[in-house]
Amino acid sequence: MTPEEAWRALEEDLADYLERKGVVPSCRAGCFACCFGLVTLSRLEGLALLPHLTPLHKARLLEEGPRRLALLKEGKDDPHFPSRFFQSRTPCPLLEEGLCGVYPQRPLACRGLLTEGDPRLCAPEATPPKGHFLPVPWRMARLRMEALWEEERRRFGHALIGELASLLYLLLKGLPQDREGVEALLQELGVLGGRWGYQVL
């Protein structure tokens, strides 16, 4: 399975599920609170994104990547790290005037985050009620992610999973193909393992 196939399959599954349940997500273009959060993706998804990055995206990633790596190094074992990052309101480098600059190629993690509630409750400063984010779409996205991890293991002998901006940065700079090289680089950067750091599976 390719990332493109996984994206299409998830979109079809989501459309079928939402129609059967009569659920209408309130997520709309211009609603981008979730674009302040940490997004996880695999190397395969990152590689599929690279051809769709504009020169501006690449420039932002080359600037933001080292900062994200430093934050991960500092916070990878902190249970509150994702919340603190979200509340810092640091936008995704692929965000353009409130719209996703790679929307057709957005990661599975982004596709699975949906709500039918008030989108204002998605904001970093809000306190959404329990169940605000729909659990089934997220589980569906997670299953597709796990299938891609298995495909990545088959292709590379291991799967690399990490934070979106820093992983795209590493791919742009040149990431080793072999597991030993990947782990050595991530160890050197101080972002391997921990609760929120990079995982090599």
Image: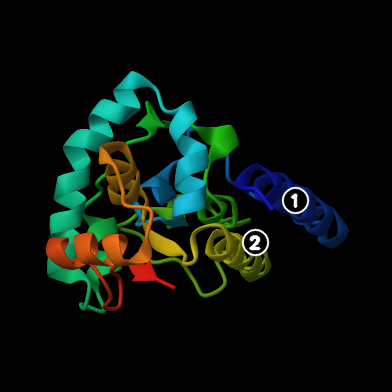
Count of numbered marks: 2
Q: Which residue is mark 1?
A: 9
Residue 136, compared with residue 22, is above or below; it is: below
Residue 59 lies left or right of residue 9; in this view the side is: left
Q: Amino acid at mark 1?
A: Ala
Task: Name the residue nearer the viewer: 4 or 77.
Answer: 4
**Can residue 186 be seen from the camera position used here?**
yes
Identify the residue at horizontal 66%, vertical 62% (top origin).
137
The mark found on residue 72 in the picture is none
Up the image or down, 83 lies above or below 10; here it is below
Q: Position of residue 101 (x, y in %)?
A: 45, 29
Q: Residue furthest right?
A: 20
Residue farthest top in this picture: 55
Asked if residue 117 lies left or right of residue 162, the reply is right
Q: Residue at x 19, y 55 (%)?
A: 69
First along the sequence among labels 2 and 1: 1
Residue 76 point in image, percent of width and height: 22, 72
Q: Quadrant of residue 62?
A: top left
Image quadrant assignment for residue 96: top left
Find the distance from the CA under tag 2 to the CA under tag 1: 8 Å
Residue closer to the observer: 77 or 36 = 77
Q: Please say if 182 is above or below 168.
A: below
Q: Which residue is mark 2?
A: 144
Tell me how the rendering is colored.
Answer: rainbow
Other-residue count near label 1 (Cα within 10 Å), few / some / many at <14 / 14–19 / ≥20: some
Assess whether mark 1 and mark 2 are in contact (beta carbons under 8 angstroms): yes
Q: Position of residue 67 (x, y in %)?
A: 15, 48
Camera-nearest residue between 116 and 45: 45
Task: Describe the element under mark 2 as helix, strand or loop.
Answer: helix
Residue 100 appears in the rendering? no
**Residue type at the position of mark 2:** Arg
Q: The C terminus is located in which quarter?
A: bottom left
